[in-house]
Image (tube, grey):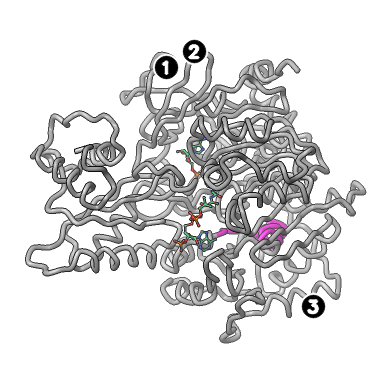
Amino acid sequence: MTSLYHQTYENWQKDPGAFWQEAAKDIDWMKPADHVFNPDNGAYGRWFDGATCNTCYNCVDRHLEAGHGSRLALIHDSPVTNQVSRYTFAELYQRVNALACVMHDHGVQKGDRVVIYMPMIAEAIFAMLACARLGAVHSVVFGGFAARELAVRIDDAKPKFVISASCGIEPNRVVAYKPLLDEAIELATHKPDHCLILQREKLECELVDSRDLDYHDHVGKALDQRRIIECAEVAATDPLYILYTSGTTGEPKGVVRDNGGHMVALKWTMEHHYGVKPGEGFWAASDVGWVVGHSYICYGPLLHGCATIVYEGKPVGTPDAGAFWRVIQDHNVAALFTAPTAFRAIKKEDPKGQLIKQYDLSNFRTLFLAGERSDPATIEWAQEHLGCPVIDHWWQTETGWPMSGNAVGLGALPIKLGSPGVPMPGYDIQVLDDDGHPVKPGTLGNIVCKLPLPPSGFPTLWNAEQRFHDAYLSEFPGYYATSDAGIIDEDGYVFIMARTDDIINVAGHRLSTGAMEEVLSSHANIAECAVIGMADAMKGQIPVGFYVVNDGVDFEPADLEKELIQLVRAKIGPVAAFKTAIGIERLPKTRSGKVLRGTMQKIADQADWKMPAAIDDPLILDEIKAALIKKGILEKEAS
Ligand code: COA
Ligand code: AMP
C-alpha cells in the first residue's frame, strides 16, 4: 500500500482547523465547538472551545448504544496472581457506574481532584473512567514512587478522594501500598476526605477510621443494585487529568490534559498511527502511572472500541521471557506497544527467540516502541524474530500522543533504524540552534514544535502557569521546547539524541537527576554531589551518584553508600533504580562553579570527550575516572 502519510500531513498543514474538525467527527459531543481552535484562549489557544462532552461516555456508553455491549473491553492478565479477568463493554459500564456512584455519594463532583494510587489492576481503569464520568480530575500516581513523592502530588492536586489498593505485587516482593498512602497523607498538608481501598488477597490492610472506605463493600453494593449515574457534561477544555512528570529540578510538573482535544487526537491515532480496528486487541505493556498507560492502556483503545490489556507482570520472570508472546496469543493482540528496555530484557534471556515459536502470533501485526531511544540492535532482533514491522515513535507526557512516528494505518513509510519516524500531523517539528535559528537538515540542535500544539497538547501545568511558560514557551518564542536534542534528516526523519535538561531515562521511566541530587544533599554528611545517567545495556541509562563528604566526617564508604541508596529509595522510590553512590574528594567544575556533569557522563560511558575549556582543575577528571575504575564500573585499561 502506498503511504497516505505525506498527503495527510500536507492536508493538516494546509488547514489544521479543517483537519481536526474532520477528526472530531469520530467523537460524540454533547454540544459542538464554537471554534475548532480559539487562538485567544489560553497560552497558545485552545481546541474545541465551547464544545461539551464526556470522555467516559465516549469510552464506554456509546459502544453499548451502538450494540457492542458484549464485545470485550478490558482484560486483566496477572501472572503475578495467576488470574485473568475479562470485562465486556457492558460489564465495564456497570463497574464504572458503580464506582462513580460511590464517589458521588461521598461528595466527589465535577472539577474535584481524585488521586489514584493503584497497581496494574482493572480497578485502576474503572477509577480513571469513573472520574471522567463525574467530570472529576484524576491524578494517577505510579506505584513505584515513595510516600514523599505521593505527598507532593497530594499537596499540589489537593484531592478530595483517593482510590488505592492494599498492595501491589512485584515479582520479588509484595508492595504494601496502604502504609505508603498513610505516610503520604501524614506528610501532606492537604488531607483528602476519603480513601477508597481495594483489599487484595495477597496482603490485606487495616482500614483505620471513617476516612477509609472498603472498595468491595461500597462498590460491591452499588454493583449489586446496578446503580447508574449520568455522565457529567464537561467543557472540551476542562481538565480530564493531571499527570505529574519529572521536571528540571524541584517539584514534579503537573501536566494538564483536557477532555475534548485528547479524545480527538487519541481516536485519530488508534486508526491512523497504530492501524488497529475496533474489536481488536490492543496492548500497551506499560503502567497506568505513566502517560503511555493513560493514553494507550486506558483512553485510546477504549475510545476506539478495542479490547485493552491491563498486564500485571514483567516481560521476563513472570514466569519467563515468553510472557509477552503468551499474552499476545491468549488475548488476540493485534498491536503491542512497549518500551525498548522490555525487549532488551527478553532478548537477553531468549537471544534466539526460541520462546516466540511456542505461541500462535498469527493475529499480531505490529510492534510499537517508545519511551526511550530504540537501539537498532533491539529493533533488528524484534524484526527478525517477530517478522513484523517494528515502529519506533517519539512523544512525551506533555503531548499525550506521538509527535513523530510511522503511521501504519496510513500505510507505513520505510523504517530508518535509530529514528522514531516523521512528524505526525499536528506537529511542525523543527530543530533550532541555541539562539533560536533553524539549523540545516542533519545538524544537531534543540527539537521544538511550532505552536500551537495539536489537540491533546497540554494547555498549562496545574497550579503553575508561570512555570509552564518558563519551562516550555519562553526559551524559543512561538515554539514549544521539548527539552530533547536531535536532528531531522533530509527526508524529514527525526532522530532523538539526548535531553537538554537534567532528565535521564531509566527503563523508559523519566527521572530527574536534580531530584536525586536533592535527596543525596539532604544527608547530613554530604557536602555536595552530582548524579549522572550512565549508559546501561538493559535499562538504557542508570543513575550514578558522586558525593563529597563534609570535612572532618569519619565514615565507612560502604555504609554511607548503603545509606544514600536507601535514602533515594525512601524519598523517591524504587523506580529511581539508584544503586550506585561513589565517594570522591571533589567534583569537577568550571571556574564559575558549574558541575561538569556532561563530561563525567562521557567518562563513565567511555565516550569521546574534550577537556572543557573553562575547567577549574583538569586533574579532577582523572580522579573521577579512577573512582569509576575502583568501583568496577570502568576497566583499568580504559584509564
Ligand atoms: N510498584 C512498586 N514498585 C515498582 C513498581 C510498581 N508499580 N514498578 C517497578 N517497581 C520497582 C521494581 O520492583 C524495582 O524494585 P527493586 O529495586 O526492588 O528491584 C524498581 O522499581 C525498578 O523497577 P524497573 O525499572 O521496572 O526494573 P526491574 O528490574 O524490576 O525490571 C524490566 C526491568 C526491563 C523488566 C522493566 O523495567 C520493564 O518491564 N520495563 C518496561 C518499561 C516500561 O514499562 N516503561 C514505561 C514507559 S513505556
Ligand atoms: P515521558 O514524558 O515519560 O513519556 O518521557 C518523554 C521523553 O522520553 C522524551 O522527551 C524523550 O527524551 C524520551 N523518549 C520518548 N520516546 C522516545 C523515542 N522513541 N526515542 C527517543 N527518546 C524517546
Q: Depth-wise, is mark 3 or mark 2 nearer the camera?
A: 2
Q: Quadrant of residue 557?
A: bottom left
The image position of residue 230, as x and y in percent, is 80, 60
User: What amino acid is labelled 3 in the image?
Assistant: Lys
**Which residue does the image show at 41% across and 67% down from the upper left?**
148
Assess whether mark 2 and mark 1 are in contact (beta carbons under 8 angstroms): yes
Q: Is residue 384 visible?
A: yes
Q: Which residue is under mark 2?
A: 490
Q: Which residue is under mark 3?
A: 221
The part of the chain drawn in magenta is 124-140
Secondary structure under tag 2 reads loop
**Which residue does the image show at 56% across and 41% down from the upper left?**
351
Callout 1 crowding tier (Cα within 10 Å): few <14, some 14–19, many ≥20: some
Identify the mark nearer the N-term, 3 or 2.
3
Q: Is residue 165 left or right of residue 397?
A: right
Q: Which mark is residue 442?
A: 1
Q: Depth-wise, is mark 1 or mark 3 nearer the camera?
A: 1
Magenta-colored stretch includes residue 449: no
**Which residue does the image show at 65% across and 40% down from the upper left?**
261
